[in-house]
Image (cartoon, rainbow, N blue to C red):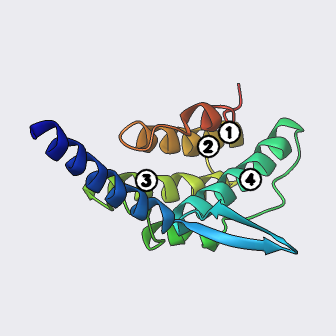
Amino acid sequence: MKVYLSGLLLIVLLGCNTSEHTEKKVTITDGAKSYEVYKPSEMSSLMKGMYAYNEQIKAEIVDGNELSNEFPEEFLKIHSAELSETKLRNETFQHYSGKFIDAQRQVFMSDSELSVKDRYNNAINMCLSCHKTECTGPIPKIKKLLIK
């Protein structure tokens, strides 16, 4: 009897778990086929955009070009973008996101005593510092942004 109740409890718990995961999926229909695909949070989408933007900046710096861009105000959404349901905007996140914004702005300040490479790497290192505290998965990818 205990085995039966334990099994039933396990099924109920797993059933609850899977319903949470289906909320993050979107169904896309292409003709006769339907696909369930992962729907990223606003923060995830924002950070992917930040990554792509910083890849462009890195290429300009490595090529020795003047930076053609300026600080993207879109990055300020880091303070308000919806996080995935398992993450919280806590004091650590607030601290690092503010430091990241400051460091990213510095990249575009040509009157700085630091080289553009150093300013850029400082901004990327702020990403790494934050991701070391939570959401460690992207760290290897973020490290590829650093200019050696």
Which residue is drawn at the image coordinates 34% and 51% (left, top)? 14
Callout 3 secondary element: helix
**Cα distance in 3D space between marks 1 and 3:** 19 Å
* Quarter the C terminus occupies: top right
Q: CA distance from mark 2 to mark 3?
A: 13 Å
- The answer to whether mark 4 and mark 1 are in CB contact below 8 A is no
Indicate left or right for 102 with 16 as reference.
Answer: right
Reading the chain from its start, which is encountered first: label 1 or label 3?
A: 3
Q: Identity of the amino acid at label 3? A: Lys
- Secondary structure at numbered mark 4: helix
The relative height of residue 43 versus residue 132 in the rendered view (above or below) is below
State the residue position of label 2: 119
Mark 4 and mark 3: Cα distance apart in space: 20 Å
Question: Extreme front residue here?
Answer: 1
Q: Check disc 3 and report the residue beneath it.
A: 99
Three-letter amino acid code of the residue under disc 2: Arg
For marks 2 and 4 on the same chain, the one whose residue lies earlier in the sequence: 4
Badge 1 local density, few (<14 within 10 Å), some, or many (20+)? few
Q: Position of residue 15 (x, y in %)?
A: 35, 57
Residue type at mark 1: give it.
Answer: Ser
Q: Nearer the viewer, residue 1 or 63?
A: 1
Give me the C-alpha separation between circle 2 and circle 4: 18 Å
Observer-side mark, 2 or 3, equals 3
- Do labels 1 and 3 touch, CB within 8 Å? no
Name the quarter where the N terminus is drawn. Answer: top left
Residue matched to label 1? 115
Residue displayed at 16% across by 36% down? 3
Left/right of residue 15 with respect to residue 34 in the rendered view: left
Q: Quadrant of residue 17?
A: bottom left
In the rendered structure, which amino acid carries the disc numbered 4?
Answer: Ala
